[in-house]
Amino acid sequence: MTHPAGLASTALVAPQLLLIPGLPLAAFTILIFAGRRLGRMSAWVAVAALAGAAGVSWGLSPTIWAGQQLAFSWPWLTAIDPRWALGFAVDGLSWVMLAVVTSIGTLIATYSIGYMRADPRFSRFFAYLSLFCASMLTLVLADNFVLLYAGWELVGLCSYLLISFWFEKPSAAEAGRKAFITTRIGDTGLLLAILLLSLVPGGLQFSRLSGLHHILPGADRTLISLLIFLGAAGKSAQVPLHVWLPDAMEGPAPVSALIHAATMVAAGIYLVARTLPLFTPQSLHVVLTVGLLTHLLAGTIALTQTDVKRVLAYSTISQLGLMTSALGLGSLRGASALAMFHLVTHACFKALLFLAAGSVIHATHEQDLSRLGGLRRAMPWTAALFLLASLAMSGVFPLSGFWSKDAILLEAWHVHEALFWLLLGGAAITAAYIFRLYLRCFEGPAAAHDASHAHESPFIMVAPMAVLGVAAAVIGWLAGSPGTHHPLLHVLGVTERHEGLDIPVLVLSTLAACSGIGLAWVAGFHRRNVLPAPLRPLGHRLYALAANKYYVDEFYARWIVQPFLAAAERLAVFDQRVIDATVDGVGRLGTTIGELKERFDRLVVDRLVNAAAETARGLGMFLRRLQTGIVHQYLLVVVVAVVVLSLALRR
């Protein structure tokens, strides 16, 4: 059984929660204003802030492991509702995310000191990195949808800044725009869900989600949960909103590691896990279908890609599909906890894979598989750690990926056998594409790159990779194995689990991993066609289909982007020829009327006014001449006036 995914309404007051996002936010503020003056020290400001946030997060572990929760809130909009407040809260689910984000973020920031050392915007990079982590931590800590949405949007902004960090490259600038626009579709769904929940008393508080099934009809909860999942699908790159993530590889390798392992793509999985009480069987069916489709389609695409980082990008999409599938299995048997368990193990080995790929690119300035090979001798540490991460990702016993992946397979077996076999096929595909990448990079003869100039990365880059290698090896056994009584799953609310290994599932998953590795060796490395002759034409067509990413980007370009651009061009022409012409015509008419009014005013009104003034002035001048001050002249005027009046009256 599991506990509800929502936060409890009663928790211990913990003001130190403010430090977790506050430290990286303070680092961002310092670096954005004083980063240039700090120079190389700016990197250590970011590392220290993230390490401090990690220390505070890990310091909460005794309380969380004891089954208690922590919270800190402050009043907001009290004039509208005195009970309304914003706040942070930590339970088992959010604590796991805090530990992942802060710990892996610290290691990636440390690695970046070596990777980005020659970049002219060195301090700016670490400022953005700090803001990215602060935004993600705010999202995780939020105890309500309003604060979560603020962190959600900040994460999207920071991803845009970091993906297009090298904006001088047109491809990087385009990738940033593509990520921002594509995820905005999902964000719109989440915003609509929040607006609908705001109409329900207490609907915005995570602590009250479990009770909403008494208030909201099933159809309303289905609609709201599907809108929430739309937001999660955008951030976590689920079909059909997955197209932004491969292009996001245009950013620096540490950015790719952070996005794929600990921050942006993990946000969607966390959101669904947090709001799972809202999901109905109908919406969970949609989640399962989308997750399974994403897992398999992205895995087959990864088998065909020739760019190192794009293979890893599609592998991330595939693994996120596996987590989403676990979420879609439902919450009755703790499937959400299994999804989070795989998120933790995936964060360790995927961060290591991206950092190792960055090490290869750093050493060779090459990332095309056709121009790589034989690097194991020149880069022994990177090769060994990449191999370790590949084995973990393939689910080889007893590395971390084995425990989380087999837990999901076992759960799928209990739900439906067909799901189990589909996910087992996905496990074989995972082993195939990741070992194809390893073998093409590190084994065999040196390819087009100059092997004599390839070198191992500096210690500042290798050390974080080594720490992640240890985590990729042991975190699954320590956190979720029967031998340790599934401690991570207990923290996540699962109170009943099968103790002991399921031998049939272990054997089948091991066979799947071995078959995938064998396929990578024969077809991916030695380039042998393993299909029977009659099936080879079909195989070539399927390979071409996957290599072209199932033409999803082309479909969007043909049926969405181009029609919108054409409509925009037509609207621009309409604006120029009709709207602008009308406005300009009205303006010209106004100008003409103004000119006519000016002429009438000048030639008629002004002349009449001037004539009246001249008349008055002339009359005044005449009358002024009569006022001489000489008495006998006044008497003369009186006599003349009397004579004139007398003559007039006589008539």
Image: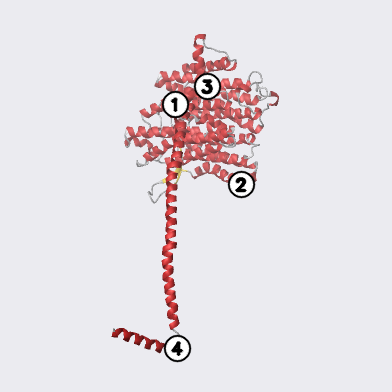
Label 1: how many residues lie within 10 Å, few (<14), some (14-19) or many (20+)? many
Q: Distance between the residues labelled 1 and 2?
A: 44 Å
Q: How far apart are marks 4 and 3 (CA)?
A: 118 Å
Pick the front one: 550 or 517? 550
Rendered residue at 50%/21% (across/down): 546
Q: Dot 2 corresponds to which residue?
A: 34
Q: Dot 1 corresponds to which residue?
A: 291
- Give the mark toward the camera: 4 or 1: 4
Tags 4 and 3 touching, CB below 8 Å: no
Tell me, for residue 547, which label it has, or none.
Answer: 3
Mark 1: which secondary structure?
helix
Q: Which of marks 4 and 2 is nearer the N terminus?
A: 2
Mark 2: which secondary structure?
helix
Q: Distance between the residues labelled 3 and 2?
A: 46 Å
Judged from this view, the residue extending furthest toward the right is 452
Q: Earlier in the sequence, mark 1 or mark 2?
A: 2
